[in-house]
Image: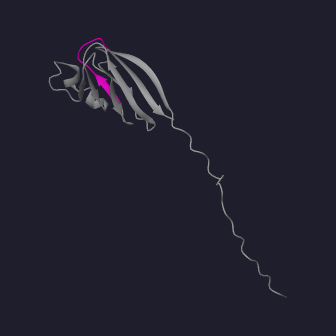
Amino acid sequence: MSELTVEPIMVHVVKDSSKQPERPIEARGSEKTIVLNAANPAQMLAGYDPLRDEVRITVSDNPVILSRSIGQASDQSNTTGTLANPNGRILANGAAEYVARGANEVWVSTNTYPTRVSFEIVRLT
């Protein structure tokens, strides 16, 4: 039997059609307003969400404390007294919109009631 020899063929790839085109990233928002009161002085605005880009917060009536956990938000320094030593960041009422970036929990609390807090959750899809 004789041996068969096959010569290699030169191939030039012009366009790789095996890869799908990248889908553009879209931002989707949802808005809500909550009211902090004596029965609920601390409330979660947004839970942990790896797809969330940011939470945009506007405070209408009284200053609030921005926190990243229920323990920090419900601290007595945030819900009673004069907010002289808050456990978190003070957000002034009537100020410009505040943006909390990232996927972590976002909580607010106050010691003056009622206090309206409006927010928008922006997720990347």
Q: Residue at x 54, y 38 (%)?
A: 24
Residue sitting farthest toward the right: 1
Relative depth, front residue between 39 and 112 = 112
- Quadrant of the rendering where the N terminus is positioned: bottom right
Q: Quadrant of residue 53?
A: top left
On screen, residue 77 above or below 25: above
Q: Residue at x 28, y 27 (%)?
A: 66
Relative placement, left or right, of 34 versus 7 is left
Relative depth, front residue between 15 and 33 = 15
**Magenta stretch contains residue 95:** no
Residue sitting farthest toward the left: 84
Relative depth, front residue between 67 and 102 = 102
Query: What range of the chain is rendered magenta?
Result: 106-115
On screen, residue 68 above or below 39: below
Identify the coloring: one colour
Q: Residue at x 62, y 47 (%)?
A: 20
Q: Residue at x 42, y 27 (%)?
A: 121
Q: Position of residue 113 (x, y in %)?
A: 27, 12
Relative placement, left or right, of 106 versus 91 is right
Relative placement, left or right, of 107 versus 7 is left
Q: Position of residue 81 (x, y in %)?
A: 16, 18
Q: How many marks?
A: 0
Q: Quadrant of residue 117?
A: top left
Q: Position of residue 82 (x, y in %)?
A: 16, 18
On screen, residue 32 above or below 7: above
Q: Position of residue 123 (x, y in %)?
A: 46, 32
**Magenta stretch contains residue 114:** yes
